[in-house]
Amino acid sequence: GDKNSNDPTAETQSNTSTEDDKELPASEKSLLQKIVRTGLITSKHDIEVQRRDPKSPLYSIKSFELLKLHPNLLKGVYEMGYNAPSKIQETALPLLLANPPQNLIAQSQSGTGKTAAFVLAMLSRVDPDLHYPQVVCLSPTYELAIQTGEVAAKMSTYCPNIRLRYAVRGEDVEKGSKIEEQIIVGTPGKVLDWATKYKFFNPKYIKVFVLDEADIMVDTQGHQDQSFRIRKLLPETCQMMFFSATYTEDVMRFANAIAPMSVIIRLKREEETLDNIRQYYVNCNNKEDKYNALVNIYGGVTIGQAMIFCQTKKMALWLVNQMAEQGHAVALLSGELTVQQRISVLDRFREGKEKVLVTTNVLSRGIDIEQVTIVINFDLPVTVTRDPDFDTYLHRIGRTGRFGKKGIAINLVSGSSDHFVLKQIEEHFCKPIECLNTDNADDME
Ligand code: ADP
Protein backbone atom coordinates (compact mmCIF):
# COMPACT_ATOMS: atom_id res chain seq x y z
CA GLY A 1 0.00 0.00 0.00
CA ASP A 2 0.80 3.71 0.10
CA LYS A 3 2.33 3.48 3.49
CA ASN A 4 4.14 6.75 3.72
CA SER A 5 1.73 9.21 2.25
CA ASN A 6 -1.37 8.04 3.95
CA ASP A 7 -0.69 5.92 6.95
CA PRO A 8 -3.54 6.01 9.40
CA THR A 9 -1.43 4.22 11.98
CA ALA A 10 0.82 7.22 12.17
CA GLU A 11 -2.14 9.40 12.90
CA THR A 12 -3.42 7.06 15.59
CA GLN A 13 -0.09 7.12 17.36
CA SER A 14 0.12 10.85 17.63
CA ASN A 15 -3.40 12.09 17.55
CA THR A 16 -5.38 13.18 20.50
CA SER A 17 -9.06 13.40 19.67
CA THR A 18 -10.70 13.82 16.31
CA GLU A 19 -14.19 14.94 15.43
CA ASP A 20 -15.03 11.36 14.77
CA ASP A 21 -14.23 10.19 18.27
CA LYS A 22 -17.04 12.28 19.64
CA GLU A 23 -20.20 10.49 20.54
CA LEU A 24 -23.45 11.26 18.83
CA PRO A 25 -26.06 13.40 20.55
CA ALA A 26 -28.38 11.45 22.86
CA SER A 27 -31.39 11.93 20.58
CA GLU A 28 -29.55 10.42 17.67
CA LYS A 29 -28.23 7.49 19.67
CA SER A 30 -31.72 6.78 20.85
CA LEU A 31 -32.95 6.88 17.29
CA LEU A 32 -30.24 4.58 15.94
CA GLN A 33 -30.88 2.22 18.80
CA LYS A 34 -34.51 2.00 17.74
CA ILE A 35 -33.50 1.39 14.15
CA VAL A 36 -31.25 -1.55 14.97
CA ARG A 37 -33.46 -3.03 17.63
CA THR A 38 -35.17 -6.26 16.76
CA GLY A 39 -36.58 -7.24 20.11
CA LEU A 40 -37.06 -6.54 23.75
CA ILE A 41 -34.39 -6.05 26.31
CA THR A 42 -35.19 -8.16 29.33
CA SER A 43 -34.16 -7.36 32.85
CA LYS A 44 -33.59 -9.54 35.86
CA HIS A 45 -34.55 -6.68 38.14
CA ASP A 46 -38.03 -6.21 39.55
CA ILE A 47 -40.23 -3.23 38.84
CA GLU A 48 -40.20 -0.60 41.57
CA VAL A 49 -43.47 1.18 42.15
CA GLN A 50 -44.14 4.40 44.04
CA ARG A 51 -47.73 5.36 44.57
CA ARG A 52 -48.96 8.70 45.79
CA ASP A 53 -52.31 7.24 46.60
CA PRO A 54 -52.08 3.74 48.03
CA LYS A 55 -55.75 3.22 47.22
CA SER A 56 -55.17 3.58 43.48
CA PRO A 57 -55.36 0.25 41.73
CA LEU A 58 -52.18 -1.58 41.08
CA TYR A 59 -51.83 -4.93 39.51
CA SER A 60 -49.85 -6.48 36.75
CA ILE A 61 -51.06 -8.52 33.82
CA LYS A 62 -49.30 -11.43 32.21
CA SER A 63 -51.28 -11.42 28.99
CA PHE A 64 -52.64 -8.83 26.58
CA GLU A 65 -56.02 -10.53 26.63
CA LEU A 66 -56.60 -9.44 30.22
CA LEU A 67 -56.57 -5.81 29.13
CA LYS A 68 -59.95 -5.99 27.43
CA LEU A 69 -58.64 -4.23 24.37
CA HIS A 70 -60.68 -3.73 21.26
CA PRO A 71 -60.33 -7.00 19.27
CA ASN A 72 -58.88 -5.18 16.28
CA LEU A 73 -56.26 -3.57 18.44
CA LEU A 74 -55.40 -6.87 20.05
CA LYS A 75 -55.06 -8.37 16.59
CA GLY A 76 -52.59 -5.62 15.69
CA VAL A 77 -50.57 -6.27 18.84
CA TYR A 78 -50.29 -9.98 18.10
CA GLU A 79 -49.45 -9.34 14.49
CA MET A 80 -46.46 -7.31 15.64
CA GLY A 81 -45.19 -10.47 17.29
CA TYR A 82 -45.91 -9.38 20.84
CA ASN A 83 -47.01 -12.54 22.55
CA ALA A 84 -46.88 -11.34 26.12
CA PRO A 85 -46.33 -7.97 27.78
CA SER A 86 -42.78 -6.97 28.66
CA LYS A 87 -41.90 -6.43 32.29
CA ILE A 88 -42.59 -2.70 32.17
CA GLN A 89 -45.80 -3.28 30.21
CA GLU A 90 -47.13 -5.76 32.76
CA THR A 91 -47.39 -2.96 35.29
CA ALA A 92 -47.73 0.08 33.05
CA LEU A 93 -50.59 -1.12 30.86
CA PRO A 94 -53.21 -1.70 33.58
CA LEU A 95 -52.40 1.78 34.92
CA LEU A 96 -52.49 3.41 31.50
CA LEU A 97 -55.81 1.81 30.67
CA ALA A 98 -57.43 2.22 34.12
CA ASN A 99 -60.65 4.10 34.64
CA PRO A 100 -60.68 6.72 35.88
CA PRO A 101 -57.44 7.50 34.03
CA GLN A 102 -54.29 7.54 36.06
CA ASN A 103 -51.12 9.60 35.49
CA LEU A 104 -47.97 7.60 35.04
CA ILE A 105 -44.25 8.32 35.13
CA ALA A 106 -42.23 5.39 33.84
CA GLN A 107 -38.51 5.00 33.63
CA SER A 108 -36.62 2.12 32.09
CA GLN A 109 -33.79 1.77 29.65
CA SER A 110 -34.37 1.98 25.96
CA GLY A 111 -35.66 -1.25 24.45
CA THR A 112 -37.83 -2.39 27.34
CA GLY A 113 -41.20 -1.70 25.74
CA LYS A 114 -42.20 1.82 26.80
CA THR A 115 -43.18 3.01 23.32
CA ALA A 116 -45.31 -0.01 22.62
CA ALA A 117 -47.03 0.52 25.99
CA PHE A 118 -48.05 4.13 25.49
CA VAL A 119 -48.93 3.64 21.82
CA LEU A 120 -51.30 0.88 22.84
CA ALA A 121 -52.81 3.14 25.51
CA MET A 122 -53.13 6.07 23.08
CA LEU A 123 -54.89 3.92 20.52
CA SER A 124 -57.28 2.42 22.96
CA ARG A 125 -58.26 5.80 24.46
CA VAL A 126 -59.16 7.27 21.08
CA ASP A 127 -62.74 7.52 19.90
CA PRO A 128 -62.43 6.82 16.16
CA ASP A 129 -65.88 8.25 15.46
CA LEU A 130 -64.84 11.71 16.58
CA HIS A 131 -62.87 13.63 14.01
CA TYR A 132 -60.63 15.88 16.04
CA PRO A 133 -57.39 15.39 18.02
CA GLN A 134 -57.79 13.57 21.32
CA VAL A 135 -54.20 12.49 21.93
CA VAL A 136 -50.98 14.51 21.81
CA CYS A 137 -47.63 12.73 21.95
CA LEU A 138 -44.42 14.78 22.17
CA SER A 139 -41.05 13.51 20.98
CA PRO A 140 -37.75 15.40 21.06
CA THR A 141 -36.91 15.16 17.36
CA TYR A 142 -38.45 14.76 13.93
CA GLU A 143 -37.03 11.28 13.47
CA LEU A 144 -38.12 10.03 16.90
CA ALA A 145 -41.64 11.31 16.29
CA ILE A 146 -41.75 9.39 13.02
CA GLN A 147 -40.56 6.22 14.76
CA THR A 148 -43.39 6.49 17.28
CA GLY A 149 -45.90 7.24 14.56
CA GLU A 150 -44.83 4.16 12.67
CA VAL A 151 -45.38 1.96 15.70
CA ALA A 152 -48.85 3.48 16.04
CA ALA A 153 -49.58 2.91 12.37
CA LYS A 154 -48.59 -0.74 12.61
CA MET A 155 -50.46 -1.42 15.79
CA SER A 156 -53.61 0.18 14.37
CA THR A 157 -53.52 -1.77 11.10
CA TYR A 158 -56.97 -3.19 11.88
CA CYS A 159 -58.35 0.07 13.20
CA PRO A 160 -58.63 1.97 9.91
CA ASN A 161 -60.68 4.77 11.42
CA ILE A 162 -57.92 5.85 13.78
CA ARG A 163 -55.72 8.38 12.06
CA LEU A 164 -52.55 10.15 12.95
CA ARG A 165 -51.04 13.48 12.08
CA TYR A 166 -47.37 14.41 12.42
CA ALA A 167 -46.61 17.83 13.84
CA VAL A 168 -43.01 18.04 12.73
CA ARG A 169 -40.89 20.21 10.48
CA GLY A 170 -42.08 20.11 6.90
CA GLU A 171 -45.67 19.29 7.83
CA ASP A 172 -48.22 21.95 7.05
CA VAL A 173 -51.90 22.43 7.72
CA GLU A 174 -53.94 24.74 5.59
CA LYS A 175 -54.42 28.07 7.38
CA GLY A 176 -57.81 28.36 9.02
CA SER A 177 -58.58 24.65 8.79
CA LYS A 178 -58.85 22.12 11.60
CA ILE A 179 -57.02 18.87 12.08
CA GLU A 180 -59.35 15.88 11.89
CA GLU A 181 -56.96 13.11 12.88
CA GLN A 182 -57.41 11.80 16.40
CA ILE A 183 -53.73 11.55 17.27
CA ILE A 184 -50.99 14.17 16.95
CA VAL A 185 -47.38 13.04 17.26
CA GLY A 186 -44.85 15.80 17.07
CA THR A 187 -42.11 17.96 18.47
CA PRO A 188 -42.92 20.45 21.25
CA GLY A 189 -42.42 23.69 19.28
CA LYS A 190 -44.57 22.65 16.36
CA VAL A 191 -47.36 21.23 18.52
CA LEU A 192 -47.40 24.43 20.58
CA ASP A 193 -47.64 26.56 17.43
CA TRP A 194 -50.44 24.43 16.06
CA ALA A 195 -52.36 24.69 19.31
CA THR A 196 -51.86 28.38 20.05
CA LYS A 197 -50.69 30.42 17.09
CA TYR A 198 -52.69 28.63 14.38
CA LYS A 199 -55.39 26.96 16.46
CA PHE A 200 -55.41 23.91 14.21
CA PHE A 201 -56.85 21.91 17.08
CA ASN A 202 -58.48 22.57 20.41
CA PRO A 203 -56.23 21.42 23.28
CA LYS A 204 -59.26 21.33 25.57
CA TYR A 205 -60.37 18.12 23.83
CA ILE A 206 -57.11 16.31 24.47
CA LYS A 207 -57.61 13.41 26.86
CA VAL A 208 -54.17 11.79 26.67
CA PHE A 209 -50.88 13.67 26.77
CA VAL A 210 -47.71 11.63 26.25
CA LEU A 211 -44.23 12.93 26.79
CA ASP A 212 -41.64 10.54 25.43
CA GLU A 213 -37.84 10.54 25.75
CA ALA A 214 -38.09 13.09 28.53
CA ASP A 215 -34.42 12.82 29.41
CA ILE A 216 -33.53 14.01 25.94
CA MET A 217 -36.07 16.82 26.20
CA VAL A 218 -34.61 18.18 29.42
CA ASP A 219 -31.30 18.53 27.64
CA THR A 220 -32.80 20.32 24.67
CA GLN A 221 -33.11 24.10 24.85
CA GLY A 222 -36.72 25.18 25.00
CA HIS A 223 -38.37 21.75 25.11
CA GLN A 224 -39.26 21.84 28.79
CA ASP A 225 -40.78 25.27 28.50
CA GLN A 226 -42.75 24.41 25.37
CA SER A 227 -44.00 21.20 26.96
CA PHE A 228 -45.23 23.09 30.03
CA ARG A 229 -46.99 25.60 27.87
CA ILE A 230 -48.78 22.85 25.99
CA ARG A 231 -49.62 21.13 29.22
CA LYS A 232 -51.24 24.28 30.61
CA LEU A 233 -53.69 24.30 27.70
CA LEU A 234 -54.96 20.81 28.49
CA PRO A 235 -58.00 20.03 30.61
CA GLU A 236 -57.63 19.03 34.26
CA THR A 237 -58.85 15.55 33.45
CA CYS A 238 -56.26 14.86 30.76
CA GLN A 239 -54.24 11.73 31.43
CA MET A 240 -50.48 12.36 31.56
CA MET A 241 -48.00 9.71 30.50
CA PHE A 242 -44.35 10.51 31.04
CA PHE A 243 -41.47 8.32 29.82
CA SER A 244 -37.75 8.47 30.30
CA ALA A 245 -34.79 6.14 29.88
CA THR A 246 -32.96 7.70 32.81
CA TYR A 247 -33.96 8.86 36.27
CA THR A 248 -32.11 12.01 37.22
CA GLU A 249 -33.19 14.88 39.44
CA ASP A 250 -33.80 17.12 36.43
CA VAL A 251 -35.95 14.50 34.76
CA MET A 252 -37.97 13.91 37.90
CA ARG A 253 -38.56 17.62 38.46
CA PHE A 254 -39.83 17.83 34.88
CA ALA A 255 -41.88 14.66 35.37
CA ASN A 256 -43.64 15.91 38.48
CA ALA A 257 -44.46 19.21 36.84
CA ILE A 258 -45.92 17.52 33.77
CA ALA A 259 -47.59 14.59 35.46
CA PRO A 260 -48.53 15.36 39.08
CA MET A 261 -50.02 12.70 41.32
CA SER A 262 -48.55 9.99 39.18
CA VAL A 263 -47.77 6.44 39.90
CA ILE A 264 -44.03 6.15 39.30
CA ILE A 265 -42.67 2.89 38.00
CA ARG A 266 -39.03 2.09 37.41
CA LEU A 267 -37.14 -0.84 36.00
CA LYS A 268 -33.47 -0.82 36.85
CA ARG A 269 -31.03 -1.11 34.04
CA GLU A 270 -29.49 -4.46 33.33
CA GLU A 271 -25.75 -3.99 33.65
CA GLU A 272 -23.45 -5.01 30.86
CA THR A 273 -21.15 -7.89 31.60
CA LEU A 274 -18.36 -9.85 29.97
CA ASP A 275 -19.59 -13.11 31.48
CA ASN A 276 -20.77 -14.71 28.28
CA ILE A 277 -17.99 -13.35 26.11
CA ARG A 278 -14.97 -15.29 25.01
CA GLN A 279 -12.15 -12.80 24.67
CA TYR A 280 -9.11 -13.26 22.46
CA TYR A 281 -6.21 -11.27 21.15
CA VAL A 282 -4.13 -11.69 18.00
CA ASN A 283 -0.52 -10.58 17.75
CA CYS A 284 0.07 -8.38 14.73
CA ASN A 285 3.00 -6.34 13.47
CA ASN A 286 1.19 -3.54 11.70
CA LYS A 287 -2.12 -2.62 10.20
CA GLU A 288 -1.64 -4.81 7.11
CA ASP A 289 -1.04 -7.67 9.47
CA LYS A 290 -4.18 -6.79 11.38
CA TYR A 291 -6.03 -6.79 8.12
CA ASN A 292 -4.78 -10.26 7.26
CA ALA A 293 -5.77 -11.54 10.67
CA LEU A 294 -9.19 -10.10 10.12
CA VAL A 295 -9.58 -11.81 6.77
CA ASN A 296 -8.44 -15.09 8.30
CA ILE A 297 -10.92 -14.77 11.13
CA TYR A 298 -13.61 -13.86 8.71
CA GLY A 299 -12.83 -16.76 6.41
CA GLY A 300 -12.14 -19.22 9.21
CA VAL A 301 -15.35 -19.19 11.16
CA THR A 302 -18.88 -19.15 9.99
CA ILE A 303 -19.92 -16.13 11.87
CA GLY A 304 -23.14 -14.25 11.81
CA GLN A 305 -22.47 -10.58 11.70
CA ALA A 306 -19.41 -8.75 12.88
CA MET A 307 -18.74 -5.29 14.15
CA ILE A 308 -15.28 -3.85 13.82
CA PHE A 309 -14.13 -0.86 15.83
CA CYS A 310 -11.41 1.49 14.70
CA GLN A 311 -10.01 4.39 16.64
CA THR A 312 -10.05 6.91 13.79
CA LYS A 313 -12.20 7.61 10.79
CA LYS A 314 -9.15 7.41 8.55
CA MET A 315 -8.35 3.90 9.75
CA ALA A 316 -11.97 2.86 9.34
CA LEU A 317 -12.00 4.17 5.77
CA TRP A 318 -8.78 2.39 4.92
CA LEU A 319 -10.11 -0.87 6.30
CA VAL A 320 -13.43 -0.60 4.50
CA ASN A 321 -11.74 0.11 1.17
CA GLN A 322 -9.38 -2.77 1.70
CA MET A 323 -12.21 -5.18 2.46
CA ALA A 324 -14.45 -3.92 -0.31
CA GLU A 325 -11.65 -4.38 -2.83
CA GLN A 326 -11.52 -8.03 -1.89
CA GLY A 327 -15.22 -8.39 -2.37
CA HIS A 328 -16.46 -8.37 1.21
CA ALA A 329 -19.89 -6.91 1.85
CA VAL A 330 -18.93 -4.29 4.36
CA ALA A 331 -20.60 -1.16 5.64
CA LEU A 332 -19.12 1.92 7.25
CA LEU A 333 -20.76 3.97 9.93
CA SER A 334 -18.79 7.10 10.69
CA GLY A 335 -19.21 10.54 12.13
CA GLU A 336 -19.72 12.62 9.03
CA LEU A 337 -22.81 10.79 7.76
CA THR A 338 -26.17 12.51 7.92
CA VAL A 339 -28.92 11.11 10.12
CA GLN A 340 -30.61 9.62 7.05
CA GLN A 341 -27.39 7.97 5.88
CA ARG A 342 -26.77 6.49 9.30
CA ILE A 343 -30.30 5.11 9.39
CA SER A 344 -29.89 3.50 6.01
CA VAL A 345 -26.49 1.96 6.88
CA LEU A 346 -27.94 0.46 10.06
CA ASP A 347 -31.11 -0.65 8.31
CA ARG A 348 -29.11 -2.56 5.72
CA PHE A 349 -26.90 -4.11 8.37
CA ARG A 350 -29.86 -5.18 10.46
CA GLU A 351 -31.41 -6.78 7.41
CA GLY A 352 -28.17 -8.68 6.85
CA LYS A 353 -27.32 -7.06 3.53
CA GLU A 354 -23.86 -6.47 4.94
CA LYS A 355 -22.20 -8.93 7.24
CA VAL A 356 -19.59 -6.55 8.56
CA LEU A 357 -20.05 -3.12 10.05
CA VAL A 358 -16.95 -1.00 10.52
CA THR A 359 -17.28 1.93 12.85
CA THR A 360 -15.46 4.39 15.04
CA ASN A 361 -16.41 5.62 18.48
CA VAL A 362 -19.65 7.12 17.23
CA LEU A 363 -21.16 3.76 18.01
CA SER A 364 -19.13 2.77 21.02
CA ARG A 365 -21.80 3.46 23.56
CA GLY A 366 -25.47 2.92 23.85
CA ILE A 367 -25.97 0.96 20.69
CA ASP A 368 -26.39 -2.77 20.87
CA ILE A 369 -26.82 -4.76 17.76
CA GLU A 370 -28.29 -8.07 18.72
CA GLN A 371 -27.38 -10.25 15.82
CA VAL A 372 -23.71 -9.38 16.12
CA THR A 373 -21.90 -12.48 17.29
CA ILE A 374 -18.38 -11.20 16.95
CA VAL A 375 -16.86 -7.88 17.90
CA ILE A 376 -13.40 -7.04 16.67
CA ASN A 377 -11.31 -4.27 18.13
CA PHE A 378 -9.16 -3.39 15.16
CA ASP A 379 -7.78 -0.76 17.53
CA LEU A 380 -8.05 -1.10 21.29
CA PRO A 381 -10.15 1.60 22.90
CA VAL A 382 -7.89 4.15 24.54
CA THR A 383 -8.40 7.58 26.04
CA VAL A 384 -6.76 10.71 24.66
CA THR A 385 -3.87 10.04 27.01
CA ARG A 386 -3.63 6.57 25.47
CA ASP A 387 -4.66 4.83 28.67
CA PRO A 388 -7.08 1.91 28.39
CA ASP A 389 -10.68 3.06 28.06
CA PHE A 390 -12.40 0.38 30.15
CA ASP A 391 -15.90 1.78 29.78
CA THR A 392 -15.72 1.84 26.03
CA TYR A 393 -14.28 -1.66 25.98
CA LEU A 394 -17.22 -2.90 28.04
CA HIS A 395 -19.75 -1.03 25.90
CA ARG A 396 -18.29 -2.42 22.70
CA ILE A 397 -18.25 -6.05 23.67
CA GLY A 398 -20.29 -6.38 26.88
CA ARG A 399 -23.80 -7.74 26.74
CA THR A 400 -26.96 -7.34 28.73
CA GLY A 401 -30.04 -9.36 29.44
CA ARG A 402 -31.34 -9.55 25.91
CA PHE A 403 -28.58 -11.89 24.81
CA GLY A 404 -28.89 -15.46 25.76
CA LYS A 405 -26.18 -16.43 23.32
CA LYS A 406 -22.48 -16.29 23.81
CA GLY A 407 -20.35 -13.72 22.09
CA ILE A 408 -16.80 -13.51 20.84
CA ALA A 409 -14.50 -10.54 21.09
CA ILE A 410 -11.18 -10.36 19.30
CA ASN A 411 -8.56 -7.71 19.96
CA LEU A 412 -5.92 -7.04 17.33
CA VAL A 413 -2.79 -5.84 19.05
CA SER A 414 0.49 -4.58 17.64
CA GLY A 415 3.39 -3.21 19.61
CA SER A 416 4.26 -3.06 23.26
CA SER A 417 1.92 -0.23 24.15
CA ASP A 418 -1.03 -2.23 22.80
CA HIS A 419 0.05 -5.21 24.87
CA PHE A 420 0.27 -3.07 27.95
CA VAL A 421 -3.23 -1.72 27.36
CA LEU A 422 -4.56 -5.24 26.81
CA LYS A 423 -2.97 -6.45 30.03
CA GLN A 424 -4.61 -3.65 31.97
CA ILE A 425 -7.99 -4.45 30.43
CA GLU A 426 -7.57 -8.10 31.38
CA GLU A 427 -6.72 -7.17 34.97
CA HIS A 428 -9.46 -4.60 35.23
CA PHE A 429 -12.23 -7.03 34.32
CA CYS A 430 -10.57 -10.08 35.90
CA LYS A 431 -11.36 -12.10 32.78
CA PRO A 432 -8.75 -13.89 30.74
CA ILE A 433 -8.03 -12.76 27.19
CA GLU A 434 -6.52 -15.68 25.32
CA CYS A 435 -4.05 -15.64 22.48
CA LEU A 436 -5.46 -16.69 19.14
CA ASN A 437 -3.41 -17.83 16.19
CA THR A 438 -5.38 -16.88 13.13
CA ASP A 439 -3.14 -18.88 10.80
CA ASN A 440 -4.33 -21.98 12.52
CA ALA A 441 -7.93 -22.81 11.72
CA ASP A 442 -8.20 -25.22 14.66
CA ASP A 443 -7.62 -22.33 17.01
CA MET A 444 -10.66 -20.59 15.75
CA GLU A 445 -13.34 -23.14 16.42
P1 ADP B 1 -38.65 1.49 24.43
O1 ADP B 1 -39.70 2.49 24.06
O2 ADP B 1 -38.54 1.25 25.90
O3 ADP B 1 -37.31 1.78 23.81
P2 ADP B 1 -40.01 -0.28 22.57
O4 ADP B 1 -41.44 -0.15 22.91
O5 ADP B 1 -39.52 0.49 21.40
O6 ADP B 1 -39.09 0.07 23.84
O7 ADP B 1 -39.70 -1.83 22.42
C1 ADP B 1 -38.41 -2.31 22.11
C2 ADP B 1 -38.51 -3.41 21.06
O8 ADP B 1 -39.23 -4.51 21.57
C3 ADP B 1 -39.22 -2.98 19.80
O9 ADP B 1 -38.60 -3.65 18.72
C4 ADP B 1 -40.64 -3.47 20.00
O10 ADP B 1 -41.28 -3.74 18.78
C5 ADP B 1 -40.42 -4.74 20.81
N1 ADP B 1 -41.50 -5.01 21.77
C6 ADP B 1 -42.17 -4.11 22.54
N2 ADP B 1 -43.07 -4.75 23.32
C7 ADP B 1 -42.97 -6.06 23.06
C8 ADP B 1 -43.62 -7.24 23.55
N3 ADP B 1 -44.56 -7.18 24.48
N4 ADP B 1 -43.26 -8.43 23.03
C9 ADP B 1 -42.29 -8.49 22.09
N5 ADP B 1 -41.63 -7.44 21.59
C10 ADP B 1 -41.96 -6.23 22.06
Image (cartoon, grey):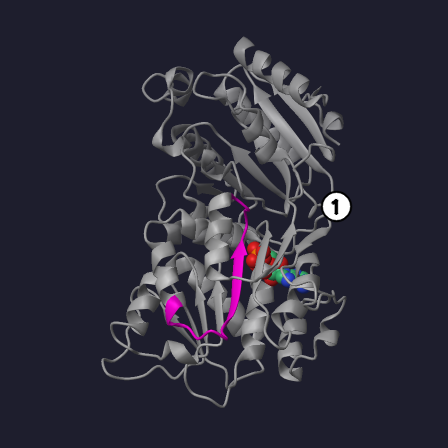
Q: Does residue 61 appear in the picture of this structure?
A: yes
Measuring 58% from the left and 35% from the top, which residue is drawn there? 395
Q: Quadrant of residue 157?
A: bottom right
Measuring 58% from the left and 78% from the top, which residue is drawn there? 124
Residue nearest the observer in this picture, 200 or 384: 200
Query: Left or right of 164: which side holds 265?
Result: right
Q: Dot 1: within a 10 Å radius of its alpha carbon, few (fewer than 14), some, or many (20 or more) residues?
A: few
**At which x and y percent is residue 250?**
46, 46
Amino acid marked by disc 1: Gly
According to the image, label 1 marks what residue? 404
Q: In which quadrant of this rendering is ligand 1 seen?
A: bottom right
Q: Quadrant of the C terminus?
A: top right
Q: Which residues are magenta?
A: 232-248
Residue nearest the observer in this picture, 429 or 208: 208
Vertical placement of residue 372 versus 391, above or below: below
**At which x and y percent is residue 374?**
64, 37
Most distant residue in the top direction: 416
- Is 1 contained in the magenta span? no
Q: Secondary structure at mark 1?
A: loop
